[in-house]
Amino acid sequence: MEELDIVILGGGIAGLATSLALHRKGIKSIVLERSETVRSEGAAFGIQTNGWLALQQLGLADKLRPNSLPIHQYSLLIIHCNGNKTRIRDVLIEEGIKRRESVGPASYGEVRGVIRNDLVRALAHELPLGTLRLGCQIVSVKLDETLSFPIVHVKNGQDIKSKVLIGCDGSNSVVSEFLGLKPTKSLSSRAVRGFTNYPDGHGFRQEFIRIKMDNVVSGRLPITPKLVFWFVVLLKCPQDSNFLRNQEDIARFTLSSVNDFSQEWKEMVKNCDINSLYINRLRYRAPWDVMSGKFRRGTVTVAGDSMHLMGPFLGQGCSAALEDGVVLARCLWRKLGQDGMNNVFSRKRIEEAIDDYVRERRGRLVRLSTQTYLTSRLIEASSPVTKLLVVVLLMIMFRDQIGHTRYDCGRL
Ligand SMILES: Cc1cc2nc3c(=O)[nH]c(=O)nc-3n(C[C@H](O)[C@H](O)[C@H](O)COP(=O)(O)OP(=O)(O)OC[C@H]3O[C@@H](n4cnc5c(N)ncnc54)[C@H](O)[C@@H]3O)c2cc1C
């Protein structure tokens, strides 16, 4: 059986960020990823100030900025800019009529769209050769009977034992199942994400626009002067997606769902890069499960979506995963940095480090997942009573709607 110090399960954003953060602190890890290549589905992410602060710690912010336009406006539904001051405007259109428009608080943070491939490659590129093992699917996790260290079982029959196991294996995580976390829940929404390339330039303002029209929420985020990232969230979408057999079906289905949007919006969806389209049903880990979940068992823990899967309504999943990586590496380094893995107390110290990580992250994640959950309920609700209740809760709990974007995960 192969024996390693730190094994990270999943080479998505969380896995690569955690491995890179550890590498920056001089701690070696191995990332096991089931895909044959680093995965690029999901087109792009909107990354806000908190995500850029984490990227800064990972040494990647300046490498990614040249390929992504700064967004001067960001909002819950529609954003508008006034000079270099950001103003937030909510526009809710129902049955073709503009129902609500409100101006929210000002924000001076950094918002940019980043192509998923650029981010994943930038993370992977900085890792030492041999860190990332592709085509390595883990089917189960168990504890070694004598020392209680984790052993992962690879689909090819191999077993790998490690001193630390970090599950960054996304929404269907085998590690969160091993930890005994409650299963994630399904929203009634489905989301499509894609790119549209405008060879002569799109000419859009550097603003993130998000529009809700009846049962469809769609957002547009310019990435470069020629490339636009967009998404369409279909609320109350039927469970059955068997009719979506290929990329062409997804393109047709998405275009039909924005039929009531402006001509410019429809053209954007119609002229998309069909290979960039990615559809999935939205799932989340309930905020009360994030609050009470047991995120450590022995020397096993989780990060990213496996820990705190949330809907895309605040655009924070990726940034929160980057924060996890920075905090987890810092906690492990504080306890193990000087002594390394061979110290006789290492098992106890690893557990303490993971406990520190969980403690530090839990408060932040409960707030993020609660705000995301309430926002999704507000967007999905049809009853005025429910809407009112959710608005009141949001106002009481999150008076500063964009406070979460100013969070700083601290120095690595
Ligand atoms: C419509 C939509 C829009 C979004 N927009 C934004 C946004 O604007 N900003 C933002 O910050 N976030 C956004 N998100 C959220 C973001 O996409 C996720 O939170 C982020 O990708 C989570 O990264 P992760 O590494 O935890 O999981 P993943 O990216 O899912 O990575 C998990 C990895 O683990 C691998 N894996 C899984 N199981 C195994 C196994 N058994 N063995 C080996 N490998 C395994 C997978 O192949 C994968 O590579 C959005 C999400 C959606 C759905």
Image (cartoon, helix red, strand yellow):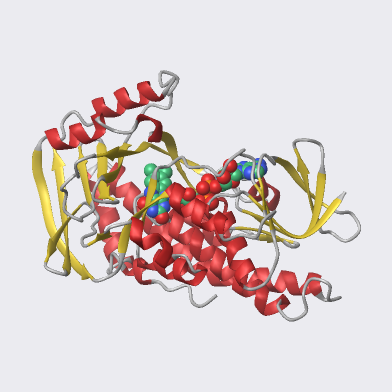
Q: Residue at x 24, y 25 (%)?
A: 256
Which quadrant holds the C terminus? bottom right
Q: Residue at x 46, y 65 (%)?
A: 60
On screen, 366 above or below 40? below
401 versus 339 height, above or below:
above
Residue sitting at the far right: 146
Rendered view: 329 above or below 267:
below
- Picture quarter containing residue 236? top left
Horizontal and vertical percent position of residue 37: 58, 41
Residue at 22% x, 36% y: name it.
268
Residue 279 vertical position relative to residue 223 in the rendered view, above or below: above
* Number of disc labels: 0
Left or right of residue 237: residue 298 = right
Q: Nearer the viewer, residue 383 or 186?
A: 186
Toward the bottom, the furthest residue is 338
The part of the image, by quadrant, that contains residue 70 is bottom left
Residue 183 in view here = no
Q: Give residue 82's position: percent from left, percent from top.
A: 11, 65
- Nearest the eye: 107 or 235: 107
Q: Position of residue 208 (x, y in %)?
A: 23, 53
Lateral position of residue 318 relative to residue 350, left or right: left
Quarter assignment of residue 195: top left
Residue 58 in the image: x percent, y percent? 51, 68
Q: Is residue 140 visible?
A: yes
Q: Residue furthest front?
A: 200
